[in-house]
Amino acid sequence: MPLTENELRDLLRDRSAATPATPDRVDAVRTRVAKQRRRELAAVSGALALVVAAGALWAMPRQSATPVDPASPSPSASPSISSTAKPVGTTTTKTQIGGLDFVITGPAEITGTEPFDVTMVVTNLVIGEWTGTIAVGLASDAEVPGMFEGGLIGAAGEAVDGYPSNLGVTLPDPGRQFSGVMPAASVTLGEIESKTWTVSVQRDPSVPAFGRVTGWLPMAQRDGDAAGTAIVATQAGEGIPVSPVESNLSCATVTIGTWERGEVQPWTLDLAYTAVVGADGKVTWEEIAGLGDQGTGVTSTQTGKVRSSTVMRALGDLGAATPSGFGAETPDLPTTLAPGRYVAYSGTQLVPITFAGTCGPSGDSISGTWTAYNDRTKGLLDCDAVAAVTLAQPVAAKASGYCPKG
Amino acid sequence: MADRPDFAEFVSVRSPALLRTAYLLTGDWALGEDLLQTALASSWRRWGRLAGEPEPYVPRTMLNTYLSWRRRRWSGEVATGVLPERALDDATSAADERDLVWTALQRLPRRQRAVVVLRYYEDLTEAETANLLGITVGTVKSQASKALATLRIDSSLARSAPETTDTQTTMDEVR
């Protein structure tokens, strides 16, 4: 059953209802502050001791310099190659996106599931301060086009989000997906300021193999940018060979034995935007809130140690489920329209698929229900014309409810 | 340390609610308490400059602290010998579904989780959420939209996650 906003509210309230008894919190805070002050005093004392020691060293009589033998070769500057030499097995990506310059160095090949480091040097190229989120990651073939279910990599060490995640990035090609790691929740760079981050990255051991992998790709999303403008440099990045590993899931592969399509559910309106275009032709789309959460998302009653995409791919291979992945389509929002009022919408029609099969390599039985997309649609209504026409698609009729009546 | 009666009063009145928010952010009561106390300790030191108006400084400090905490442990899938569970009856499945959504919530990127808690638990407006998090309304909208989409998708993904990722590893991985 798709999650609604009200269900989410109920869940959050229920979960936080039973507040545990707490000892005197004011005392606990006082203790913390006292400890912090002791640490600060210790640090200041240590620093003072260093200053005193340094002063003492400075005051010591210095030895006179030994005259240089004119015959001896003068020391040369560090070889220029040292600044460009790379350790064996690394690759460097240089690119500029979102007003930032990225130089990213990571391994040229991924083998096994041991952590490795990826370093990025980021320079702000825009006038003024740049604040937002950045990440580094890989693009790989998706198991099911348009569907993201865990990524190839996640953070192994200090990072904002340790789980394999696409960080909200959708690549133009639905057959490809981004998985990345953010080094900080938010970064701020002054004008032409450079900062360096090194993140420890680890391969997701639940994923046995992926197809084409390219990296290392930067992601940048400046605060204040419009929704969905996380930018990934999809063109940059060399191919990264990734060796297959054994999945750590007890149900690493799925073979479907039997399956049955249930009754197709009614069309639901997932997303709708309205725009009123004035005489100046300016088009500003605004999402309609409170649609409820009808239809979006795909759920399954399948439980156990299996990736959802593994089940979906197995069903898709049999023609049982649409391979179009998760999520409602985004309505097309034209940038030029004649003056008037418009509604852009998208909708879905779901169908439950019950199945039974076998896990590999364990041979365990597996069964469940996959709620797949039977169909998806999107469209654009001209409110001045919609009243005069008959809308064949039920979801379009629902969307027309957002046109003014009369 | 000097006594600050108004601070004690603020802690007494507001900290139960702040603790609930901290719990929803971290997914763990002990970690939530740690987060709250960290924020309160930071606020205590600036109490004199808050001129008796600690709102929204304290919640904002708590959110910033939460967003800047760093994970230290890999928390992906781990091997298990447990066989896949069988299908459950409807009532159990409904409870299970909420557990899965809760687990999926823990998997959200932190800023998205913060937006979800502020918008759907605190019932703050988009503008109030943006103000507390120091981001734009547009970012609040996009983060909330992404979070909801992920929660709908990830409740099934969470089925394959080890239960320890919900709470047991959290204490270790976030400090």
Image: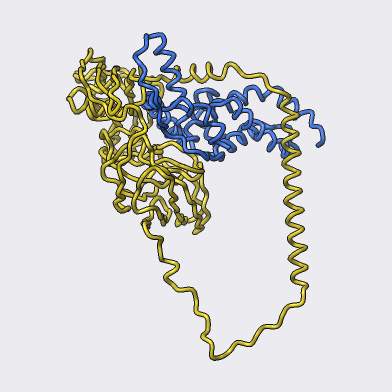
The quadrant holding residue A103 is: bottom left
Colour used to depict chain B in the structure image? blue
- Where in the figure is residue A360, as x and y percent of width and height? 27, 27
- Asked if residue A336 is positioned above or below residue B100 in the image, the reply reads below
Q: Quadrant of the C terminus of chain A?
A: top left
- Residue visible at 49% across and 18% down? A11
Residue A74 seen by the camera: yes
- Residue visible at 29% across and 17% down? A367
Q: Quadrant of the N terminus of chain A?
A: top left
- Where in the figure is residue B173, as x and y percent of width and height? 53, 36
**Residue B134 relative to residue B6: left or right:** left
Residue A327 seen by the camera: no
**Residue A71 relative to residue A85: left or right:** right
- Asked if residue B147 is positioned above or below residue A167 in the image, the reply reads above
- Where in the figure is residue A109, as x and y percent of width and height? 34, 51
Number of numbered markers:
0
The quadrant holding residue A292 is: top left
Colour used to depict chain A in the structure image? yellow
- Where in the figure is residue A215, as x and y percent of width and height? 34, 50
Residue nearest the viewer, comparing A307 with A286? A307
Residue nearest the viewer, comparing A157 with A284? A157
Residue nearest the viewer, comparing A34 with A71? A71
The quadrant holding residue B30 is: top right
Q: Residue furthest left?
A: A319
In this figure, which colouring scheme has been used for the structure? by chain
- Asked if residue B35 is positioned above or below residue A104 in the image, the reply reads above
**Residue B29 relative to residue A319: left or right:** right
- Residue visible at 74% across and 28% down? A26
